[in-house]
Image: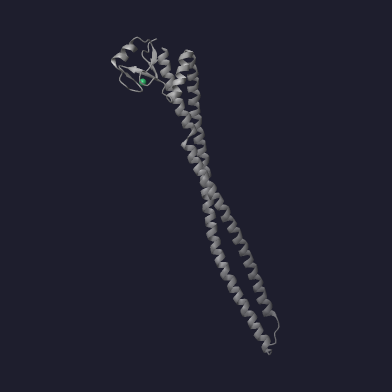
Amino acid sequence: MSVGTDLLDLQELDLALARSRADLADLPEIKALARKRKAYLKVKDDTLRIVGRRKDLETELAELEEDERDCKQAVEDVQRGCVDPSDYDAVQQLEIDLSNLAKELDKIAFAREEHLRNLAEVKEQEAQASDFLSRCERAIKADAQAARNKAQSIQADIDQAERRQTALRARIPEDILAEYDRCLKRFNGLAVERLVGAVPSTCRMTLTESSLADLSRVEGITHCPYCHRMLIVTEEA
Ligand SMILES: [Zn+2]
């Protein structure tokens, strides 16, 4: 194979390598994974707050139940106390005490009901959040594995292309390789073009008769009179 063909192959390989490296650096799977992780962390944070609220409600409920027990005990104590039925003041005080305790018990019962409703609601939120979190964990695990697999496959392609690149570069003469590298930088990856009839394959400017006559005296590689890329005139060795 001629040096010209090797150069064109090398350019194609270098372009493919640049694409693979860009793909690897910018995997959509990694971005999707980051979005899922963010959503997961937010719900995890919310769940901590929900659990805190549930624990508070449970504590408050336990306190209400204790208040209720105390109150019922107080009713019993009042009822058991001996009051002289002829002592009007004492009877009246007993009625006031019992009525106050009954009001207190009503208040406690009302608060308990409200707490129980809130607790049921919070427990439902907690169950939903924990269900979301476990589904999210499974999805993140699977996505991470898929992203790893894809990255590994791209990396394997890169490794293989780099080995071919090294082998190709080893057979191209050093001065031509140096010119290729210079043009690669200058022309942003498109260093070499081939002459197809009267038209170079990259800049696609039809060459004049006199340019073509000049090129006909060249064997192999020269520079394009228009864009100054390396121009492969003949690919035969
Ligand atoms: Zn050109």
Q: Total of numbered circles in the picture?
A: 0
Residue that protrudes farthest toward the left in the picture: 209
Q: Position of residue 40 (x, y in %)?
A: 53, 46
Compared across the picture, whether 229 is left or right of 128 comes to left
Compared across the picture, whether 33 is left or right of 90 comes to left
Vertical side of 69 occupied by 4: above or below: above
Query: Which sits in the foreground, 10 or 31?
Result: 10
Query: Which sits in the foreground, 126 or 4?
Result: 4
Query: Which sits in the foreground, 13 or 30?
Result: 13
Q: Position of residue 37 (x, y in %)?
A: 52, 44
Seen at 65% across and 86% down, the residue is 92
Vertical side of 124 occupied by 211: above or below: above
Q: Quadrant of the N terminus?
A: top left
Query: Which sits in the foreground, 177 or 38?
Result: 177
Q: Position of residue 220 (x, y in %)?
A: 38, 12
Q: Quadrant of the C terminus?
A: top left
Q: Position of residue 59 (x, y in %)?
A: 63, 62
Task: Dividing the image into four quarters, tell me where ligand 1 lies.
Answer: top left
Seen at 50% across and 26% down, the residue is 156
Image quarter of residue 233:
top left
Vertical side of 114 occupied by 74: above or below: below
Residue that protrudes farthest toward the bottom in the picture: 86
Q: How is the image coloured?
A: one colour
